[in-house]
Image (cartoon, grey):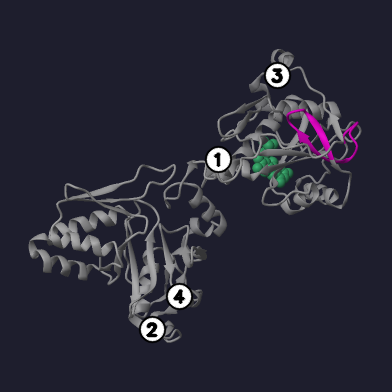
Amino acid sequence: MLLPLQLSFKKSINIIEDFNNTVIIQSPHIRGNIPPQSLNINQPSPGVLAAIQTLATDGATEEDLSDLVLQRDGVSQLPKFYYYLQKLIQLGTLCYSIVVEGLPLAKLVPLSLDGKIEFKKAVINKQYVLSRFAYCRKEHQHLVLESPLSQAQIILFGWKGAALISELAKPQLAHEICTKIPGISEEVTRLFFSLLLSTEMLFEVKEDGKTQEEESEPLRQWEFHNLLFHSRTRTGRHSNPIGRTYPFVEQIKPLPAVKPKMSKDTIDLYKPDISNLENTDYPLTFILERRKSLRNYSENEPITDKQLGEFLYRSARIKQIIKTENEEMSRRPYVNGGAAYEFELYILANTCQNIPTGFYHYCPQDHQLCKISGKNQYVAALLEDAWLANRDRSFPQVLIIISARFQRIAWTYESIAHTTLLKNVGALFQTMYLVATAMNLAPCALGNGNSDLFAAAAGTDYYAETSVGEFILGSKLLV
Ligand SMILES: Cc1cc2nc3c(=O)[nH]c(=O)nc-3n(C[C@H](O)[C@H](O)[C@H](O)COP(=O)(O)O)c2cc1C
């Protein structure tokens, strides 16, 4: 490594000295991830042992560590020391700090277990600017700089690091920026720039005023929030716990599989005879080939209560409740990652024969509509949004709003709860499309909806339950 950075172990690394005089350096066990990786150093020389112990405290530069080995062991152990140092870097066990007058300014912490950092040196006379993907947030008692382009996090200690980041929102030269922040030399600034360059948080500004980040067409088309969501909900760039880890077991009670009814004002819905349908329904390929989005309706013959009942029964009813030791799950016609079935369906009946205009919650267990309200200002606004989203601009006869009780899925999954939920919306959409096609109805999914408006209409807490998908349905316009 070329930079005079201070090396130390990541806080989460375990150092075990066993009876056989072996030092085991072990990455932590992370829920849902690959098992911990470790490096065993058998009978380390006094110098190598001292270097390991130094890395386990405040750390030291590579030069100071090799001096330590040289003093204690002589030159013979240096190759071994460098061999182990390389291994520790490859395992992502080491942090790299900039220390100014004994105080840390910034510390690079590798996030992924196999993400080797390729160190780059910032140079004088070149301008650098912060990546538009870099962001600061609070973690424990520090500010951290992160980016979905990066495999590492930078901890910023004190205000000087934050001040440097703030200045880097516009292109900067190292020798100019350091004049704005007291106590930061040009050399420290260049080291800081190098740390950010090596972690893809900073980019060089070329002569035409552009950066590599701005020139890349694939990168230009990523919005900040999408790339962050993608990188944090897939494995590769982080080593956060992932998958079915039950992060809140014994801390927070899981929600029941069935949401309690929202009112006593209920409408029993028609139930089709499924075994009869199994024998008489159209073949799958016939339906798949005819499925399409239909956005106009027969106004003379709006959808009926019976059709709505059949549609909901065939797409979204509860077929079975399954109780395990820890949680309640269920079986329904559509596929659902995690089987938590986090969705609730809300029916905005606009012009549905035999169902008074209003806003209803669908009870998938009793196959009933529970009335929430008539046509109030929120309901009218939801309907107008659906009208705007419908490419052909016709008012839906029925608007189905899919909400999620987020805790159902967040109780089970870590890192991937929300991305699984969105995949589940797609699975429900396709099921509803196929059922509507088989029933000769007009289905269309919508791409956007107002979750705050939904929460106001349904009286839910936005963070506990709000809308994640919209689907419009009506009687088919015969041409
Ligand atoms: C997630 C999703 C969002 C959609 N959003 C809208 C929308 O906002 N407005 C609309 O008119 N159609 C929307 N559609 C329907 C698509 O435009 C339609 O599926 C696509 O054009 C293919 O046509 P087809 O469904 O007739 O095969 C959406 C479909 C999906 C799956």
Res. 158 mark: 4
Q: Nearer the viewer, mark 3 or mark 1?
A: 1
- Separation of marks 1 and 4 at Cα, in angstroms: 37 Å
Q: Is residue 363 magenta?
A: yes
The mark that comes first in sequence, 3 or 4, is 4
- Residue displayed at 44% across by 65% down: 201
Q: Nearer the viewer, mark 1 or mark 2?
A: 1
Q: Nearer the viewer, residue 291 or 449?
A: 449
Q: Which residues are magenta?
A: 352-371
> Would you say 349 lies left or right of 59 here?
right
- The quarter of the image holding the C terminus is top right
The mark that comes first in sequence, 3 or 2, is 2
Q: Is residue 185 positioned above or below 233 on the image?
A: below
Q: Which residue is mark 3?
A: 282
- Separation of marks 3 and 1 at Cα, in angstroms: 37 Å
Whether label 2 lies within 8 Å of ligand 1 gets the answer no
Please rate how many residues cluster around mark 3, counting C-alpha atoms within 10 Å: few if below 14, some from 14 to 19, many from 20. Answer: few
- The amino acid on which the numbered mark 4 sits, given as a three-letter code, is Gly
- The amino acid on which the numbered mark 3 sits, given as a three-letter code, is Tyr
Q: Is residue 350 positioned above or below 10 on the image?
A: above
Q: Quadrant of residue 120?
A: bottom left
Residue 381, x across and y down, in percent: 82, 52
Q: Which residue is mark 2?
A: 175
- The amino acid on which the numbered mark 1 sits, given as a three-letter code, is Thr
Number of disc labels: 4
- Separation of marks 3 and 4 at Cα, in angstroms: 68 Å
Cβ–Cβ under 8 Å for marks 2 and 4:
no
Quadrant assignment for ligand 1: top right
- The amino acid on which the numbered mark 2 sits, given as a three-letter code, is His
Cβ–Cβ under 8 Å for marks 1 and 4:
no
